[in-house]
Amino acid sequence: MIFSGIPGIIGIKWNDGIKEGGGVGTLWYGGKIRTLISETDVQEAVFVNDGYILGVGEKRKLEAKFKGQITTYENLRGAVMYPGFVDSHLHMIGHGEKLLRLDLSEVTSVSELMEVLQRRLEELPKGSWLTGEGFNENLFPDKLVPNRHILDEVTTEYPVMLTRVCRHACVANSYALQLAGVDETVSNPPGGIIEKDSFGKPTGYLLDHAQDLIRAVMPESSFSDVEKALDISIHDMFKNGFVGGHTEDLNYYGDPLQTLACFYKLIDGRRIKFRANLLIHHEAFPQIIGRGKADENHAFIERGAIKIFADGALGGRTALLSEPYADDPSTNGVQIHKRESLEQIVKRARADGFPVAVHAIGDLALEQIIDVIEAFPPSNGKRDRLIHMQVARKDLLERLQKLPVVLDIQPRFVASDFPWVEERLGTERLTYSFAWKKLLAAGLRCAGGSDAPIEPVSPLLGIHAAVTRRKPEENHQGYQPEEKLTLFEALRLFTYGSAEAICKENERGLIAEGYVADFTVLEKDLFELEPDEWLGVAVEKTIVDNTTMYDRCLQ
């Protein structure tokens, strides 16, 4: 069928019923095929026709069975084929922005931060904003969050806004605060905190929805900038072995329909094939759903669940806990939505037949969304998604076992958040925190993602963190070693688990008959290497719909 272009992109059409390579029969051979049906299932060859796997097994048997249909032979040359990796939760445009912008995620002190900002300032034209992505005060020796006074030492002539690594907090200088009208008279907005000093003056540190006060006065990104960020993000994901991603971007760059148009323009099903599942922020939902069902049949872009934020993050102490923070008893976090508001959003999603995807890091946020899902479950055949779920409780896991949910976890958070998170939570709560093994042992469906740009997008880094529960450069048994996953379990997070998150496990996430021909080809077999060696393994090819979207030999 012919798919009409999105408003704002005039004259573009997508024929999703015709794909390049249609009718081409390809036999992949010459390497090892890790199907991930089981930990030990290894095959010799795969036959693909029209983008779907028709046979898996011995090369000679497939040649005999599909004689006359094989038009192309693809030699893996000793490499290892896995089901295509899919990141179950990230922000693709944000990932591209991080690749393009000033990255502060590796800065390890306030003095280094000031030096980096000063160098960038020398490159900026007058009237520009000085912005940076991903500072993390937990890497600083004194763990000091930079404030407006520190940024004012860099400049008072340019507005400055730096985003914390979690993206649930930012810091602004006095000029930016002045432009936003944030002073001692301004109260906390709903779902946000304006940090103030002992004199009642803003420190420049703004958490969760309070960040919107600064963003409201910043220049909007042009859609050429958004398109450029998305384009570089897609190609970087191909380079990392991803055939797709479940991404949430539609509510942060002005008109959600224009952002959506960027996805359709780039992922055209010919030049670029990438399986994008688009989570829809609840505030953008009316506009996106207003488009009707025109985009439901696109071969590579799917409308996903309705995204809701129930709380913030542990780093800024805005994740909503049932008990106060161990290192700051004055707070137990931030509740983004009251119960009534949360119910209304979920009921609206149900009325239009959508599942929800809820950001819930703290156990109280988790409890509140479980309450709502129990009262308003998704329609048959659909699953809700609970994103991050870093702090839980035994009673909550028991309730989750009875619900049609998938847990979107980010294994890399273990490597990034420990050991400082122990100070936030205290030892007692750690038993059910970042407890990936307990989730799987309880029979809960889990999908694996990066939350890029919060964490590096690399799936091998995520798999490494799931198995070792430490940073690559660290030399210990891992944080909470009883929660380590096996390599097979970790790989399934980024393949079969991501398919389960969108109810596609019968056609994606394995190398088996009837499944789509999406493959990630690595130069070596991870099962034959030590975990720290995985990070040096190159992606040889990324294949979507039997089309090679990345080939290391051609780079």
Image: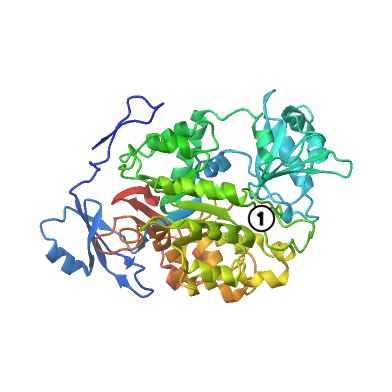
Q: What is the secondary structure assignment of the residue under circle 1?
A: loop
Residue 517: image location, x then y, percent: 29, 55
In the displayed structure, 407 sits above or below 8; it is below
Give the farthest residue toward the left: 68
Q: Residues within 10 Å of mark 1 (few under 14, many from 20)?
A: many
Rendered location of residue 91, percent (x, y) = 52, 46
Q: Measured from the top left, where is residue 339 in percent x and y? A: 60, 52
The three-letter code of the residue at mark 1 reads: Ala
Q: Residue drawn 33% across and 55% down?
A: 518
Of residues 547 and 213, which is closer to you in this image? Answer: 213
Above or below residue 52? Residue 227 is above
In the rendered view, does 353 fall on the left or right side of 135? left
Q: Residue furthest right?
A: 199
Q: Nearer the viewer, residue 27 or 93?
A: 93
Residue 124: x and y, percent?
67, 28
519 or 177: nearer the eye? Answer: 177
Residue 277 seen from this side: no
Quadrant of the rendering where the N terminus is positioned: top left
| Displayed quadrant of residue 363 | bottom right
Q: Which residue is mark 1?
A: 319
Comparing 141 with 376, the one in front is: 376
Q: Quadrant of residue 474?
A: bottom right
Residue 346 in view in this figure: yes
Establish if 8 lies above or below 295.
above
Coloration of the structure image: rainbow
Q: Residue at x 16, y 52 (%)?
A: 71
